[in-house]
Structures are given as C-alpha cells and as structure tokens.
C-alpha cells in the first residue's frame, strides 16, 4: 500500500489539487499566483515602499532626506536649560540653514522664541529685584 505522500518531508505540499478545491481560487491558487482573490498579497509577502512607477527615474540614486541641523536641535534644548544660549544658537542655526538647505528651521525658530521669552522674563525679574532693593534701601516702603 503505497501513498504519494509517504516520501514527503514535513512542510511539503502534496501533489495535485486539495480535495474539494475545484474552483482554483483557494490557498493553492494564492501560492501559485502570488495574490489572493481580494487583490492583496498573501500573508507574509507584504511589499513595502512606494507603488511601482513612483520614485526616482532609472539611473538616478535614491532620494534621501536632508539632515537636520545640529545647531537647531541644540538651540531648542538650550532654550530650556540656559535661555540666552538657546536664543543665540537659534539665530546662528537659522543662518546656517539658510546657507546649507538643511532641515530644522522650525526647531531653530522654537529655540529663538522660547529662549527670547525666558530671557525676557529673567531680565524683567532682575530689574524688579533691583528696583525693590533700591526702594528698601531708600526707605520708601513702610512707615
């Protein structure tokens, strides 16, 4: 009693159509033709990237994104750590971005805005402290 399936290794598919699959649109059809009846690739064969026909023309290298300016990243970080430095680094980064065409213009602008606001608050606080100490020394507060 010999069976064609006896000599198959585990994972091999048996020869011939599976029983009950007479339409040609079952799993075996998907394996042979690489797509399901719903127009999607079968499980495990997902294709990533742009659809065919998109991307750089043949013979050209693939397009890469522009790098982000390091000074712009530092400007935003330093705006929270030491605001005047963030303000200065933001101005320098915007100038560099204009010349080199790098990314990070928004980061540099945020560093300028946050650094400027925090620096202005510290200057205002410092002026108010000096004015209050001067008023205390002259005796204009109290009876």
Image (tube, rainbow, N blue to C red):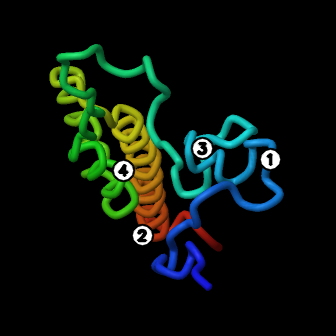
Q: Nearer the viewer, residue 82 or 68?
A: 68
**Which label is found at residue 76?**
4
Marks 1/4 in contact by CB < 8 Å: the verdict is no
Numbered mark located on residue 143 in the image: none
Circle 1: element type? loop
Label 3 SS: loop
Q: Is residue 60 left or right of residue 7?
A: left
Which residue bears the numbered disc 2? 137
Nearer to me, 46 or 136 = 46
Residue 105 in the image: x percent, y percent?
35, 32
Q: Residue at x 63, y 47 (%)?
A: 30
Observer-side mark, 1 or 2, equals 1
Q: Residue at x 68, y 43 (%)?
A: 36
Residue carrying label 3: 41
Residue 22's label in the rendered image is: 1
The earlier-in-sequence mark between 3 and 1 is 1
Give the Cα separation between the discs numbered 4 and 3.
44 Å
- What x and y, as percent, mark residue 121? 47, 52
Circle nearer the viewer, 3 or 2: 3
């Amino acid at each position: 009693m010999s069976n064609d399936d006896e000599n198959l290794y585990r994972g091999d598919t048996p020869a011939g159509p599976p029983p009950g699959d007479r339409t040609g649109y079952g799993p075996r059809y998907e394996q042979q033709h690489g797509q399901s009846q719903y127009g999607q690739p079968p499980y495990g064969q997902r294709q990533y990237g742009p659809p065919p026909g998109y991307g750089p023309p043949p013979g050209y290298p693939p397009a890469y994104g522009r790098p982000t300016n390091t000074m712009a990243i530092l400007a935003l970080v330093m705006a929270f750590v030491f605001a005047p430095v963030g303000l200065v680094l933001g101005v320098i980064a915007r100038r560099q971005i204009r010349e080199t065409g790098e990314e990070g213009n928004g980061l540099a602008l945020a560093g300028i805005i946050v650094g400027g606001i925090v620096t202005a608050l510290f200057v205002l606080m410092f002026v108010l402290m000096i004015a209050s100490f001067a008023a205390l020394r002259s005796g204009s507060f109290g009876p």
